[in-house]
Image: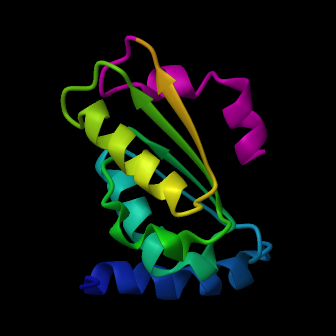
């Protein structure tokens, strides 16, 4: 089930958007490593809160991926990651694509678990997080 911490974050997002005058229809969730795993979790449990997501080298259970609807999702993973094996991510992404999830999947050739060092320089990412 959902942890109380995750539930608290989900409750805070609309309040923070209102407080800071952010466009609540254009909120992105993102994470790296374990943060990406948590970002996947909150995106699947509360897809109404996010318009897009970017996950970098994090694990995911695609069981409830259909909840993501038409959320725009970018996934990055290093091909030599030994902490979160790319084979598992490849399988998860394939399952999510089969469920109609809107994923752009990018592998970072030769990168280990710290592929975020490469990803932050990608022009696509800069445009995506705009």
Q: Is residue 51 left or right of residue 38?
A: right
Please tell me whether residue 64 is drawn above or below residue 125 in the rendered image.
below
Q: Where does residue 33 sit, x and y in percent of width and height?
A: 33, 43
Identified at 46% across, 72% down, the residue is: 44
Q: Is residue 39 above or below residue 114?
A: below
Where does the image place residue 35, in percent across and percent down from the top left?
A: 36, 53
Quarter occupied by residue 57: top left
Above or below residue 15? Residue 117 is: above
Left or right, residue 32 beside residue 21: left
Q: Residue at x 29, y 18 (%)?
A: 80
> Horizontal placement of 62 versus 43: left or right?
left
What stretch of residues is rendered in magenta? 110-130
Residue 32 lies, in percent from the top left, at 40, 44
Residue sitting nearer the eye, 10 or 108: 108
Q: How is the image coloured?
A: rainbow
Q: Quadrant of the N terminus?
A: bottom left
Q: Residue, x 45% and y 67% (percent of image)?
A: 65
Magenta span contains residue 72 = no
* Residue under the point 19% across and 26% down: 82
64 on left or right of 112: right
Front one among 115 and 100: 100
């Amino acid at each position: 089930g959902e942890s109380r911490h995750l539930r608290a974050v989900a409750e805070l997002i609309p309040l923070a958007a209102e407080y800071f005058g952010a466009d609540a229809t254009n909120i992105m969730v993102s994470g790296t490593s374990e943060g990406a795993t948590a970002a996947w979790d909150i995106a699947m449990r509360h897809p109404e809160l996010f318009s897009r997501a970017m996950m970098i080298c994090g694990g995911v259970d695609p069981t409830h991926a259909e909840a993501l609807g038409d959320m725009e999702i970018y996934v990055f993973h290093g091909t030599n990651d030994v902490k979160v094996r790319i084979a598992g991510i490849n399988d998860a992404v394939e399952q999510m694509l089969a469920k109609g999830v809107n994923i752009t999947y990018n592998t970072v050739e030769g990168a280990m678990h710290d592929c975020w060092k490469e990803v932050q320089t990608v022009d696509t990412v800069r445009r995506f997080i705009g």
